[in-house]
Image (spheres, rainbow, N blue to C red):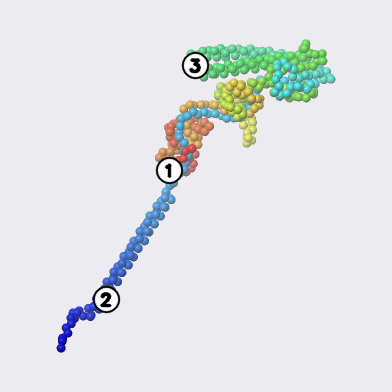
């Protein structure tokens, strides 16, 4: 009988059964460790996200809370010409205006002249005829005698004025000749020659005005003689002709229609529109800074700007209400045109103009806009901008122009200053500048 041998596992079935649970426990532990690792990574990610969010929130809060630059407008201090001027409205007027009036009471014939008509000296402007009643009674005759004496005295005074104006013109011409000689030799500046020429021109105008006044006095004397019947040229009907005292144009007709007029009633205004001057009324506080000979620029009349010079400032002021109803003390400043008459031939009597009177002028003046300078205590100050920061700087100001102000000390050419800085700009504040 054959025998069968078998090999038996020394561990037996029990050892295989124990091995399987051991492998299951190791897998579960590995899975547990993997889950814990993932959970740790998730916690770290959440912590990192929280830290990043906190940093971002802190950065945003810092950006929001930090001081922002103040936006401002800036300008550069520069050297340029600066003028101190006064601007005011004015009107033109004829220098030598003659108001021709009725010498006696009578019946006026209708005037044939119209405003603008050219007339010559001695032309008959109007004719007066006697009224039905006697033209001169005893009282009127006495008044006419007194008027004759007054006219005779006025004629003598006018002749004296002509003599004085003639002497003044001769002296001005001699001074002009000497000044021209000294200017050509280099002993005097060109400005002295211009002033001498201006003075000679003014003396010539004064002589012309005195001559016109003498002619008026002569005609008034003749009219006084006619009123008394002592003029040989008077007609049998004793009609009185009112003659033009000077050549020129009819500016205004006061009495056009025929009718009875009283002695002294204005009839016609006569003048020469080619001899104009400007009348500019200024506040007395401004007029004290104006001097005869000051330069003037005339604009706003409808043509190119004209040049002129202040000829005189009237010594007496007057009161005039302003646009707001406030009474103002004003005074007339007379400006003479220095440009050739051809440039302002279209100007007439009573035309409105704008005058700029130059009180002071500098060529190379350190200046900044007026809005950059403000009061600080008893002095003035500006904000100078450097490295995007405002610095308060005290300055000393001089003349003030229309838009700019002169800086005497505290700034240099090329410095950047804030214009109209406002309350937010302080010393040391960061600013964001924009040029004007």
Q: Which residue is mark 1?
A: 430
| Contact check, label 1 and label 2, Cβ < 8 Å | no
User: Mark 3 or mark 1, which has the lower sequence index?
Assistant: 3
Taking the view exactly as shown, the residue that stands out farthest to the right is 132
What kind of element bears circle 2? Answer: helix
Marks 3 and 1 sit apart, C-alpha to C-alpha, by: 56 Å
Which numbered disc covers residue 188? 3
* Other-residue count near label 2 (Cα within 10 Å), few / some / many at <14 / 14–19 / ≥20: few
Query: Residue 201: image x %, image y %?
Result: 59, 17
Name which residue lies at 69% across and 17% down.
Answer: 247
Taking the view exactly as shown, the residue that stands out farthest to the top is 232
Q: Which residue is mark 2?
A: 21
Is residue 226 visible in the rendered structure shown here? yes
Quadrant placement of the N terminus = bottom left
Left or right: residue 20 versus residue 194 is left
Query: Residue 172: image x %, image y %?
Result: 57, 14
Q: Quadrant of residue 200?
A: top right
Q: Nearer the viewer, residue 100 or 112?
A: 112
Marks 2 and 3 sit apart, C-alpha to C-alpha, by: 130 Å
Q: Nearer the viewer, mark 2 or mark 3?
A: 2
* Other-residue count near label 3 (Cα within 10 Å), few / some / many at <14 / 14–19 / ≥20: some
């Amino acid at each position: 009988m054959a025998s069968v041998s078998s090999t038996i596992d020394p561990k037996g079935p029990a050892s295989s059964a124990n091995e399987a649970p051991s492998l299951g426990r190791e897998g579960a532990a590995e899975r547990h460790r993997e889950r814990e690792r993932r959970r740790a990574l998730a916690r770290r990610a959440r912590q990192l996200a929280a830290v990043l969010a906190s940093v971002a929130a802190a950065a945003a809060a810092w950006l929001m809370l930090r001081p922002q630059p103040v936006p401002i407008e800036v300008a550069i201090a520069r050297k340029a010409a600066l003028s101190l001027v006064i601007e005011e409205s004015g009107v033109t007027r004829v220098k030598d205006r003659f108001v021709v009036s009725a010498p006696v009471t009578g019946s006026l014939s209708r005037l044939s002249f119209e405003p603008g008509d050219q007339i010559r000296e001695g032309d008959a402007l109007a004719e007066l005829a006697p009224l039905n009643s006697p033209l001169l009674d005893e009282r009127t005759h006495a008044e006419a005698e007194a008027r004759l004496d007054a006219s005779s005295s006025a004629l003598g005074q006018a002749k004296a004025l002509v003599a004085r104006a003639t002497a003044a013109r001769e002296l001005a011409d001699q001074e002009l000749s000497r000044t021209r000689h000294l200017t050509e030799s280099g002993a005097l500046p060109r400005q002295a020659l211009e002033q001498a020429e201006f003075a000679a021109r003014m003396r010539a105008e004064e002589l012309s005005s005195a001559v016109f006044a003498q002619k008026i006095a002569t005609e008034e004397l003749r009219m006084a003689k006619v009123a008394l019947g002592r003029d040989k040229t008077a007609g049998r009907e004793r009609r009185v002709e009112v003659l033009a005292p000077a050549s020129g144009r009819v500016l205004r007709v006061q009495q056009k229609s025929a009718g009875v007029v009283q002695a002294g009633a204005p009839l016609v205004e006569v003048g020469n529109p080619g001899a104009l001057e400007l009348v500019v009324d200024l506040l007395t506080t401004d007029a004290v800074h104006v001097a005869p000979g000051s330069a003037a620029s005339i604009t706003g009349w409808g043509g190119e700007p004209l040049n002129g010079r202040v000829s005189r400032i009237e010594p007496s002021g007057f009161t005039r209400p302003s646009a707001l109803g406030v009474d103002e003390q004003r005074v007339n400043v007379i400006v003479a045109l220095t440009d050739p008459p051809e440039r302002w031939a279209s100007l007439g009597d009573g035309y409105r103009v704008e005058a700029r009177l130059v009180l002071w002028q500098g060529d190379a003046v350190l200046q900044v806009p007026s809005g950059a300078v403000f009061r600080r205590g008893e002095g003035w100050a500006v904000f100078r901008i450097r490295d995007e920061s405002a610095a308060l700087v005290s300055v000393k100001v001089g003349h003030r122009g229309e838009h700019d102000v002169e800086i005497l000390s505290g700034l240099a050419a090329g410095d950047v200053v804030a214009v109209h800085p406002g309350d937010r700009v302080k010393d040391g504040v960061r600013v964001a500048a924009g040029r004007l």
